[in-house]
Image: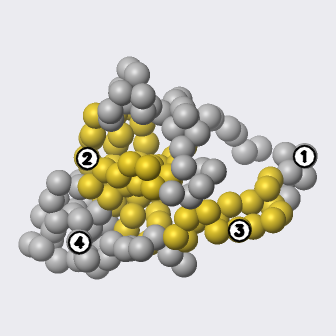
């Protein structure tokens, strides 16, 4: 599937309802996501060796990409992202070297850090415990 779906969620029962497509990827597949302090979804795009990877900031109301971070080299498999730094304004992007030739993508499997523009920031991750 080259899409991100959204659902209504019942907090009491954990039930998902009313599924619908929020966002469709044109190039690659959606992979790991995180939500920022403004409520936008940041989604890593896994491109299977076909062009530089990226992370898109997606409006949760419209599903439109409002900002993108492109990896600065040929690394194609961006796998996830999270926020860090004292103000949560640094986007960390993990990448993978799965089924790729290391000489073609020498930085695959690396970690990238990108300073975000003013007005874009993350928030501390929520912790939970499974008992």
Q: CA distance from mark 3 to mark 4?
A: 28 Å
Mark 3 closeness class: few <14, some 14–19, many ≥20 residues within 10 Å: few
Residue at 32% across, 33% down:
117
Q: Which residue is mark 1?
A: 12
Q: For the residue labelled by badge 4, is the local secondary structure a helix, a strand or a loop?
A: loop
Residue at 33% across, 35% down:
116
Residue at 41% across, 54% down:
56
Q: Which residue is mark 3?
A: 20
Q: Nearer the viewer, mark 3 or mark 1?
A: 3
Residue 30: % across, % down: 47, 66
Sequence order check: which comes first, mark 4 or mark 1?
Answer: 1
Position above or below: 124 against 23: above
Q: For the residue labelled by badge 1, is the local secondary structure a helix, a strand or a loop?
A: loop
Position above or below: 49 against 59: below
Q: Which residue is mark 4?
A: 51
Q: CA distance from mark 1 to mark 2?
A: 38 Å
Work out which quarter of the rendered image holds the N terminus and state it: bottom right
């Amino acid at each position: 599937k080259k899409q991100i779906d959204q659902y209504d969620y019942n907090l009491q029962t954990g039930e998902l309802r009313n599924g619908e497509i929020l966002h469709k990827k044109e190039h690659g597949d959606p992979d790991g996501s995180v939500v920022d302090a403004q409520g936008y979804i940041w989604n890593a795009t896994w491109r299977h060796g076909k062009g530089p990877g990226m992370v898109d900031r997606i409006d949760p109301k419209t599903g439109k990409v409002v900002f993108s971070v492109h990896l600065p080299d040929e690394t194609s498999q961006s796998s996830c992202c999270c926020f860090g730094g004292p103000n949560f304004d640094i986007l960390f992007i993990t990448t993978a070297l799965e089924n790729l030739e290391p000489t073609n993508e020498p930085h695959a499997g690396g970690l990238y850090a990108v300073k975000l523009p003013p007005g874009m920031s993350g928030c501390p991750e929520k912790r939970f415990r499974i008992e």
